[in-house]
């Protein structure tokens, strides 16, 4: 179930009133001007990101208070202040800075981040604009460099992200909800998580997010994705972006995922789609303001007898004007592009124009709001043909301005808004003939069709507002947290009670699984060598006479002997309980010797069939089991083939042979039904009971389904008080398990082993004194 779906199922009033939401944005919504030491600072609305800031503002109300942390940007100096030009923030001395901070907080609930200009430029003009922005919009950089500039920009990106995270941590109080915005701050969620492990963190990516094939080109791809994973919920504008993100995490980081999100080393990061809208009421008020009507009249007079097409795009690499009769371009980010567009306009005018008629008017400057709304209102059609756009709020504003005229909207299907604007004339911006046809269709469209299409668009714009977007995201974030709590059947292992119980015990049984429990999962089985710190702890545990320590694994005897055989005090069980080797002995005992192994040939045939058809997959042969691995295959195709293979095995083998199929971590395993890890644990419990009065402390620890048999057996060990039985699942807390506790990672397991080992070591020192 994805977060948007939780909304329909869970009660709306689950938040207590007046909780605080702290937004972390690249820039504050205001341009700051210094008026002089005796005057108040002045704050004027900053251009751009108006939908985001409208959404943020809308959250201030009965339920929430908002605080916005954002970059101050360049600080302007009023001519009256007696200083020159604009300057970067560091000139601010203590008193002036305090005055600015206090005033922003009091007047607007904002806290400014004052960055030095070098870091700010390296972060924004550098890493954001030259690395991330083109890539996120499907443009691979074509200027090869020696990597030095990129490293400097990356360093600036990290430094600036850290500054935002630190500022947040400074402001944070328990219970706050944190909402980080956009691609400028993708490392911030994990930086915060490192300092505030239990915080409620949302991240919304306002920009597009590319497919994994594009994203994987980014040299810092892992760092960026892991930074994002610090969030509890990552939101995107479109379903396609969300899907790309999930599959990128699977492919680049090798994490397991579901359509709801990504499982990241014991933390589930939910992913959802939340298309942003505009503040419809405010746009309605602005388009009807007194300044707009005279502009409408002036434009109408200027183009009497002509149909007006309007286009408005930011001039950057991802937005090109295909055919525009009146354009207004906003920020000039590229002089080269401006030149290109001017040339195209001149060409069209030269070819199709005359002394009395100029078909393309290209205005390349910021136009004032009155002119903007007048243009959107007077147009006969809008042509918005970006080749990539996170959303495109101009299309929404155009619909608001056309309440009377019903002018058709020609919209690029590669703009985020296209997904919800089904009544627009959607075009592929690369298909020039298709765009030309759409323009013609728009101009000859009947009034009736225009009205019907416009009504549908308007309904969409008025219902999916900026406020709706912001509220949906925050509610989903809260619900994902609630869902994690609800799924948390299994609490985090309480180390204190474990150690207390361990200390007082006289005879302990410790059973550990191997892969994914005491050794991290690796790309190939041969690479999963035991970590040295784990081996040291294991050795100390084995040296404690009160302990009986076992590794109970799916691995074969040779593998376990090779990696762990040097610890004589360690008991080993291989192939999920088929073989055991008692501590201080060298002989393996085959517990499955009476099992029928005739199934192996048929299973091998099926596994071979899938191996031949799944590049990267391979078969691991064991004495009593066969394993088909697909970790190195394409993740989606591998998972698909594994399902097919499982169905095949179930149909062809299970009904006829006494075997079981185990669905492991990127593997499928077949082994006799009569052996399992629980049987080994049971054998050890019974033997100890018969020989020496039983254990008074039991621990089993494992990460996959085969380990559930150990947990089950231990939970039934009636002779041991339940508070001294520790069954521990390794991995994400949300998974159903029979274990009583969970630990998130292999690292946490090793730390627990070390903690028990130090109890054993100090007991042995005390005894020898
Ligand atoms: O019972 P376990 O000790 O957890 O062993 C289960 C299987 O582990 C191995 O495969 C898994 O670990 C590999 C190394 O990290 C990894 O490459 C693979 O994708 C995992 O499935 C082992 O190869 C199997 O024989 C074990 O049954």
Image (cartoon, rainbow, N blue to C red):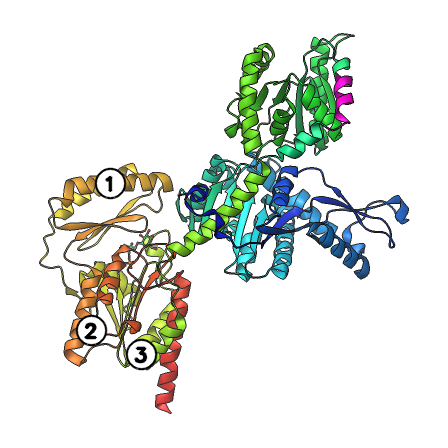
Q: Which residues are magenta?
A: 289-299
Q: Would you call the spot at circle 1 few (<14 residues within 10 Å), some (14-19), or many (20 or more)?
A: some
Looking at the image, residue 747 lies above or below residue 734? below
The mark lying in front, picked from 3 and 1, is 1
* Residue at mark 2 to residue at mark 1: CA–CA distance: 39 Å
Q: Would you call the spot at circle 2 few (<14 residues within 10 Å), some (14-19), or many (20 or more)?
A: few
Front position in the image: 142 or 696: 696
Q: Position of residue 40 (x, y in %)?
A: 82, 51
The mark lying in front, picked from 2 and 1, is 1
**Residue 543: assigned label:** 3
* Residue at mark 3 to residue at mark 2: CA–CA distance: 15 Å
Marks 3 and 1 in Cβ contact (< 8 Å): no
Q: Position of residue 311 (x, y in %)?
A: 66, 23
**Residue 655: assigned label:** none
**Residue 645: assigned label:** 1
Q: Position of residue 750 (x, y in %)?
A: 39, 67
Residue wearing tag 2: 585
Image-quarter location of ligand 1: bottom left
């Amino acid at each position: 179930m994805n977060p948007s779906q939780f909304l329909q199922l869970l009660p709306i009033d689950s938040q207590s009133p007046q909780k605080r939401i702290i937004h972390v944005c690249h820039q504050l919504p205001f341009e700051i001007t210094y008026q002089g030491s005796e005057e108040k600072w002045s704050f004027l609305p900053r251009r751009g990101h108006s939908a985001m800031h409208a959404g943020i503002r809308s959250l201030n109300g009965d339920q929430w208070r908002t605080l916005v942390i954002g970059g101050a940007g360049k600080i302007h100096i009023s001519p009256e202040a007696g200083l020159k030009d604009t300057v970067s923030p560091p000139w601010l001395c203590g008193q002036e800075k305090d005055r600015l901070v206090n005033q922003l907080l009091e007047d607007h609930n904002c806290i400014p981040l004052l960055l030095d200009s070098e870091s700010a430029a390296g972060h924004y003009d550098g890493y954001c604009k030259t690395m991330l922005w083109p890539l996120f919009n499907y443009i691979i950089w074509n200027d090869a460099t020696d990597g030095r500039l990129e490293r400097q920009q990356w360093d600036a990106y990290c430094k600036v992200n850290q500054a935002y995270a630190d500022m947040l941590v400074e402001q944070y109080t328990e219970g706050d909800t944190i909402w980080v915005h956009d691609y400028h701050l993708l490392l911030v969620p994990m930086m915060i998580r490192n300092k505030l492990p239990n915080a409620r963190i949302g991240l919304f990516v306002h920009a597009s997010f590319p497919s994994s094939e594009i994203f994987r080109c980014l040299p810092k791809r892992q760092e960026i994705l892991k930074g994002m994973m610090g969030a509890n919920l990552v939101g995107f504008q479109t379903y396609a972006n969300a899907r790309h993100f999930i599959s990128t995490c699977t492919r680049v980081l090798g994490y397991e995922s579901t359509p709801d999100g990504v499982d990241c080393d014991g933390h589930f990061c939910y992913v959802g789609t939340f298309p942003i809208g505009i503040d419809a009421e405010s746009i309605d008020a602005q388009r009807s303001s007194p300044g707009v009507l005279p502009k409408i009249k002036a434009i109408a007079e200027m183009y009497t007898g002509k149909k007006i097409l309007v286009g408005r795009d930011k001039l950057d690499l991802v937005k090109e004007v295909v055919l525009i009769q009146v354009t207004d371009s906003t920020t000039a980010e590229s002089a080269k592009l401006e030149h290109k567009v001017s040339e195209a306009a001149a060409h069209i005018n030269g070819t199709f124009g005359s002394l009395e008629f100029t078909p393309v008017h290209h205005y390349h400057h910021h136009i004032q709001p009155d002119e903007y709304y007048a243009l959107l209102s007077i147009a006969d059609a809008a042509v918005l043909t970006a080749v990539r756009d996170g959303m495109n709020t101009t299309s929404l504003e155009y619909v608001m301005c056309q309440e009377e005229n019903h002018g058709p909207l020609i919209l690029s299907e590669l703009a985020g808004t296209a997904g919800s604007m089904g009544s627009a004339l959607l075009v592929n911006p690369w298909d020039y003939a298709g765009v030309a046809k759409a323009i013609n269709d728009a101009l000859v469209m009947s009034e009736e069709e225009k009205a019907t299409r416009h009504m549908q668009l308007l309904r969409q714009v008025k219902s999916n507002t900026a406020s709706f977007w912001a509220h949906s995201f925050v509610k989903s974030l809260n619900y994902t947290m609630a869902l994690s709590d609800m799924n948390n059947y299994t609490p985090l292992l309480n180390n204190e009670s474990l150690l207390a119980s361990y200390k007082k015990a006289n005879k302990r049984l410790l059973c550990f699984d191997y892969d994914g429990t005491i050794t991290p999962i690796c790309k190939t089985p041969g690479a999963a060598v035991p970590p040295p710190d784990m081996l040291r702890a294991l050795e100390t545990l084995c040296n404690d006479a009160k302990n009986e320590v076992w590794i109970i694994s799916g691995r074969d005897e040779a593998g376990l002997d090779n990696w762990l055989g040097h610890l004589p005090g360690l008991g080993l069980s291989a192939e999920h309980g088929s073989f055991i080797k008692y501590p201080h002995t060298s002989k393996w005992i085959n517990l499955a010797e009476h099992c029928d192994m005739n199934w192996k040939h048929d299973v091998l045939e099926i596994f071979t069939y899938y191996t031949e058809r799944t590049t990267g997959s391979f078969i691991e042969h064991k004495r009593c089991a066969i394993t088909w691995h697909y970790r190195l295959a394409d993740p989606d195709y591998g998972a698909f083939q594994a399902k097919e293979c499982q169905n095949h095995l179930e149909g062809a083998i299970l009904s006829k042979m006494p075997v079981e199929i185990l669905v492991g971590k990127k593997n499928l395993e077949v082994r006799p039904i009569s052996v399992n890890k629980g049987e080994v644990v049971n054998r050890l419990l019974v033997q100890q009971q018969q020989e020496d009065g039983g254990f008074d402390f039991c621990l089993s620890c494992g990460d996959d389904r085969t380990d559930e048999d150990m947990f089950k057996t231990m939970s039934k060990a009636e002779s041991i008080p339940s508070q001294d039985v520790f069954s521990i699942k390794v991995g994400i807390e949300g998974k159903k398990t029979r274990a009583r506790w969970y630990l998130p990672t292999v690292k946490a397991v090793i730390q627990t082993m070390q903690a028990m080992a130090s109890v054993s070591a100090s007991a042995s020192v005390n005894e020898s004194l």
